[in-house]
Amino acid sequence: MNTNINLNIVNSKINLLNLSPKQIQLFLKSIGAKNFTSEQIMQWIYSHNCFDFNKMLNISKNIREKLNQTSYLKISNFSEEQISFDGTMKWITFLNNKKIETVYIPEKKRSTLCVSSQIGCALKCDFCATGKQGFYRNLTVSEIISQILQAKKRIDNKKITNIVFMGMGEPLLNLNNVVSALKIILNKNGFGLSKRRITVSTSGIVPAINKLSQKIDINLAISLHAPNNYIRNLIMPINKKYNIESLLTAVSRYLKHSNANRNGVTIEYVMLQNINDSNQNAEELACILKKVPSKINLIPWNSFKNSSFISSTPDKINIFANILRQKGFNTTIRKNRGEDINAACGQLTGNMINRSKNHL
Ligand code: SAH
Ligand code: SF4
């Protein structure tokens, strides 16, 4: 698997959008710039959407020339846009003739951007359209960050209050690039979001959860989706490598060092009729989560072509939620947004519904 395609260097020049704040600082030092130049450059890029060194007039001419000789700034553009009846927006970026998706979900009190971390996904969860597509490659830092820069432009700099890594791909299988992108999102000269407003969702790559905790503190969401290993093995092949016990142990360890997850980890649980939605399953779930401070988010399953699952009925989901609430768990039911344009969780395959597709 080649994860370095497109990475940093073109004709020995570096795309600065692939660097974390610390790496930008080191790079600038290496070309003789003062310490504060990295802050200035980041402000030009992330606050002013400026990608031309020649226009960064508060940076000395000498350093601007050196920057032009050694580096460049290149973002990946959105090429298609679709807007749902409920205001959700979905964008496609073409990379190596493949597509990735970014989704913007405006709500009353917050506006969430859902970004992709890989082209496709290798983990083949049975209920997920992205998983059915297979894996192509990891996204570079600039490709992750470009989704945010481009979205801000499309929504006219309206505020993005939250960013979730719940688009295409398994973020923890692209750990280094995702962590660099997270550092830019957190940095005050980057996007300046607080750690409590950034969520990384993972299907449970245990060693990567352990590494993550040494690198960065953000909200963690765990795609658990089953109350026991028997059911999880059936729907999530990754469970055969990292089972529920090892996953929950890693989560507890992460929580010990985390301030962002003060109110507990988010447990995602997709509701699949007659697979994981019985009352007994709810009891089992409450039992395995007894020792893990958690908020549970029940997700009605979103259908896609050629899948044999059926979503649990709203009644069944409510009964399931109430059992968990009675056991003391903060339990929410996810509202499906953007379903009419296939922008909901697990529907992301890079395809646009033909209605009202705009080329950008
Ligand atoms: N790979 C990561 C993040 C992307 S998926 C992960 O699995 O956590 C974002 C969320 O959508 C995950 O909880 C995932 O399990 C869920 N999901 C996938 N397919 C779905 C579908 N068809 N309907 C509802 N949720 C789905
Ligand atoms: Fe990959 Fe997440 Fe989909 Fe599983 S649910 S196939 S890990 S994107």
Image: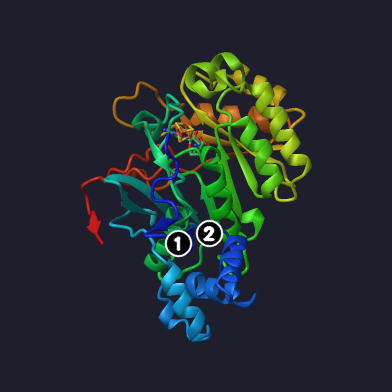
The x and y percentages for residue 116 are 44, 47
The image shows residue 48, relative to residue 315, as above or below, that is: below
Compare residues 166 and 88 and report the one nearer the observer: 166
Q: Which residue has dot 1 on it? A: 14
Query: Is residue 295 in sight in this rendering?
Result: no
* Mark 2 burial class by Cα count in 10 Å: few <14, some 14-19, many 20+: many
Q: CA distance from mark 2 to mark 1?
A: 9 Å
Q: Which residue has dot 2 on it? A: 19
Assess whether mark 1 and mark 2 are in contact (beta carbons under 8 angstroms): yes
The x and y percentages for residue 360 are 26, 62
What's the residue type where badge 1 is placed?
Ile
What's the residue type where badge 2 is placed?
Leu
- Left or right, 30 with respect to 116, comes to right
Query: Is residue 331 in sight in this rendering?
Result: yes
Residue 288 appears in which quarter of the rendering?
A: top right
Q: In terms of secondary structure, where does tag 1 sit?
A: strand
Compare residues 65 and 80 and report the one nearer the observer: 65
Q: Is mark 1 within 8 Å of ligand 1?
A: no
- Left or right, 48 with respect to 28, comes to left
The image shows residue 14, relative to residue 280, as above or below, that is: below
The structure residue drawn at horizontal position 52% and vertical position 26%, both measured from the top left corner, is: 316
Compare residues 35 and 123 and report the one nearer the observer: 35
Which quarter of the figure is the N terminus placed in? top left
